[in-house]
Amino acid sequence: MAPNTQPVLSNNTAPIEAKDSSNDSGVEDIESTVSSTQSLTNSILEHVYENGRRYHRKSQGKYALPSDETEKDRLDLSHAYYLEMLDGKLCLAAFNEDPANVLDCGTGTGIWALEYGDEHPGSKVIGIDLAPIQPDWVAPNVYFELDDLEKEWTFAEDHFDYIHSRNVAAGIKNWEQYLRQMYKHCKPGGYIEVSEHSYNDLYCDDGSMPDDSPFLLYIRTVSQSLEKMGMNPNLVLSDYKRLLADAGFIDIEAHTFKCPFGPWPRGKKQRRLGAILEEISRTGFEAYGKAVMTNYGGLTEERAAEMIKECVELVNKGTQHMYSQQWCLVARKPE
């Protein structure tokens, strides 16, 4: 069952133009039973508290982002952001009929899996994550499992018609193994979709972000800290394409999206996306940076908090027109 890949929706490489500073902020544009194959033992449910945030104990050393209610809210808002980015679509791979078996890697709160299951009642959707932060209520065709994606997968080989993976790079140390497992468990002729953003750099098209910007200091400190944790924050689009090809996938399609921080762009859609990302960044800089910078980057809690505060305030000011890049890749396993 070959999918019809969605039209290219990315804003690609065209420079993002800033709107007139006299214009409005754009903020008005944003009006906007865990079922597991393993027991939810006390050890799995244990959490640790540091830097004023809650983290999942079993994720320590594997994933440095929090697992508290603030983070769950951020993850759900991020999901809304990606829906906006893809013009309301959950993914870029569209099938002629509901794919029978679907896997969502790093499901987080489970919101993508639940919505995909709702849109595709003929699909059985499984969401996998380290932390038990999914809802207790699920649709009859959606299941959640607690597992480590970097361990050997226990699914049947050649099983999934579609595998979805979004923003897991902060928790994957061995991308070659991760994609090999995707290939092994994807059905011949099946599709995978990988969506990741830049971790080692931020961008600006109009020169408003100086070389000594707090944004650049932050992202480079986070990147260095992730490296010390054993992750690879230096992967870019060309690396993901190569890794997919090396794993055996073919028909690789790649899409690049510019993601502005703040409602400074002139274009209506980019301004709306920037307004949503501004809201996400209120807790996002802390979520991505605080634990990893203090535990692996050698920063004190006070210095990390100061760096995060500077970035949040700078997004709110809108004087530095910074954006990140999101890469979405769709690939097929040969028949």
Image (cartoon, helix red, strand yellow):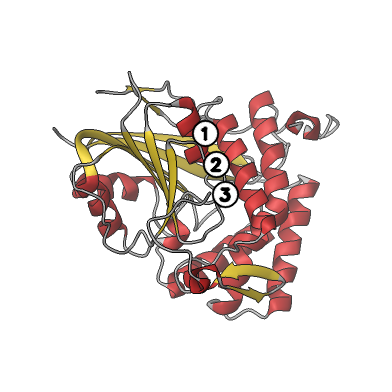
Amino acid type, callout 1: Glu
Crowd around label 1: few <14 · some 14–19 · many ≥20 (10 Å)? some
Query: What is the CA distance from the residue labelled 2 to the residue labelled 3?
Result: 12 Å
Residue 13 visible to the viewer: no
- Quadrant (top left/top right/bottom left/bottom right) for the C terminus: top left
Read off the residue under disc 2: 111
In the shown orientation, is residue 26 left or right of residue 181?
right
| SS type, badge 3 | loop
Residue 329, x across and y down, in percent = 36, 38
Amino acid type, callout 3: Asp
- Circle 2 or circle 3, nearest the eye: 3
Q: Is residue 197 above or below residue 227?
A: above
Residue 149, x across and y down, in percent = 36, 58
In the shown orientation, is residue 89 left or right of residue 164?
right
- The residue lying toward the viewer, choosing from 212 and 315, is 315
Read off the residue under disc 1: 115
Q: Residue at x 65, y 75 (%)?
A: 49
Q: Earlier in the sequence, mark 2 or mark 3?
A: 2
| SS type, badge 2 | helix
Read off the residue under disc 3: 136
CB-based contact (under 8 Å), mark 2 and mark 1: yes
Locate residue 321: give its quadrant: top right
Crowd around label 2: few <14 · some 14–19 · many ≥20 (10 Å)? some
Q: Residue at x 56, y 49 (%)?
A: 109
Residue 23, x across and y down, in percent = 83, 29
Amino acid type, callout 2: Ile
The numbered dot on residue 227 is none
Q: Is residue 202 above or below residue 60?
A: above
Q: Residue at x 34, y 23 (%)?
A: 95
- The residue lying toward the viewer, choosing from 162 and 126, is 126
